[in-house]
Image (spheres, helix red, strand yellow):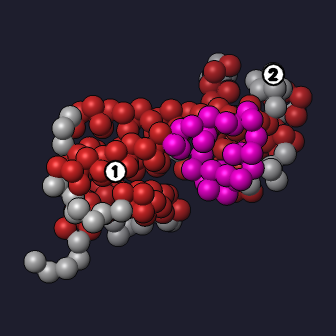
Amino acid sequence: MTTSKTPSERRTHLVRLAGDLFAEQGFRATTVRQIADAAGILSGSLYHHFDSKESIGDEILSGFLDDVLAGYRAAVAEAGDDPRGAVERIVRSSTATLSRHRAALTMLQNDWHYFSGQPRFGYLRTAMKEIEQTWIDLLERGKADGVFRADLDARLTYRLLRDILWIPTSWAPSKSWTTDEIVDGLLRLLFDGIKAA
C-alpha cells in the first residue's frame, strides 16, 4: 500500500531536489523545468508550491542561515564568559549545520555575487555580517582576557577559520575520518598549533 505525500512533505521534497540541482548546476543555470522533471511533475505543478525559482532558493538559503545563526547565538550564550569555549562550540555547531545544508553552502559559494546583488536576498549580507561580528567579538574578547595571542588579527583569523570550516563540505565521503575527528583535528590545530612544545 502506498501513501501519498502531504503538501508539506511534497514541498520539502521539491526543495531538496531543487537544492541538489542548484548545487550541481548553479542557481542561474537551473531551470524550473529541470526541477519539475527531477520531481516527475509538470512545470506548472511546481507553481502550486512556489511562485518562482527564487522562492525555492530563498527557502533553502534562509533556512540555512537561520540554522547557522541559531547555533552561533546558542554557542555564545552557553559559553558565557569563556571565549575559547564559545569558539569551540561555534566550530562544532558550524560543522553540524554545514553538513545538513550542503546544497545551500554550495549555492552561496558558487552564486554569491548573484544572490548578494538581488534585493530579495538582502538578508544574506546581514546574516554574514552577524556571523563575522560574532567571531571578531569572541576573538577580541579572548585577546583582552589573555586567552588568545595579543597579536592575533581577529578579521584574518575569522576569514581563515570560516573558509576552513566550509572546505570539508566539498570533500567526498571518507572512511578515513569522521566529522568529529575532522572537528577535533581543526580544534587541536587552532588551539595547540603544529609546533612541538
Q: Is residue 192 left or right of residue 169?
A: left
Instruction: Say above or below: 11 vs 75.
Output: above
Magenta span of residues:
103-129
- Rendered-image quadrant of the C terminus: bottom left
Q: Position of residue 187 (x, y in %)?
A: 26, 60
Residue 117 location, x and y as percent? 74, 45
Q: Is residue 128 in the magenta section?
A: yes
Label 2 packing within 10 angstroms: few (<14), some (14-19), many (20+): few
User: Which residue matches tag 1?
Assistant: 91
Q: Which part of the image, by quadrant, shows the N terminus?
A: top right
**Secondary structure mainly formed by the magenta segment:** helix
Q: Quadrant of residue 43?
A: top right
Image spot of residue 124 (x, y percent)? 61, 40
Report which residue position mark 2 lands on. Answer: 48
Say which of 139 and 66 sits in front. Answer: 139
Q: Quadrant of residue 177?
A: bottom left
Q: Looking at the picture, does residue 93 appear above or below residue 6?
A: below
Disc 2 or 1, which lies upstream in sequence? 2
Q: Is residue 167 left or right of residue 197?
A: right
Please say whether residue 143 is visible from this viewpoint. Answer: yes
- Identify which amino acid the numbered label 1 is placed on: Val
Residue at 77%, 26% (x, y): give it: 50
Q: Amino acid at mark 2?
A: His
Which mark is drawn over residue 178?
A: none
Q: Residue at x 75, y 50 (%)?
A: 114
Q: Nearer the viewer, residue 43 or 166?
A: 166
Residue 15 seen in the current view:
no
Q: Would you say the residues marked 2 and 1 are in contact, meaning their CB atoms lie under 8 Å apart?
A: no
**Judging from the image, what secondary structure is the residue with disc 2 in?**
loop
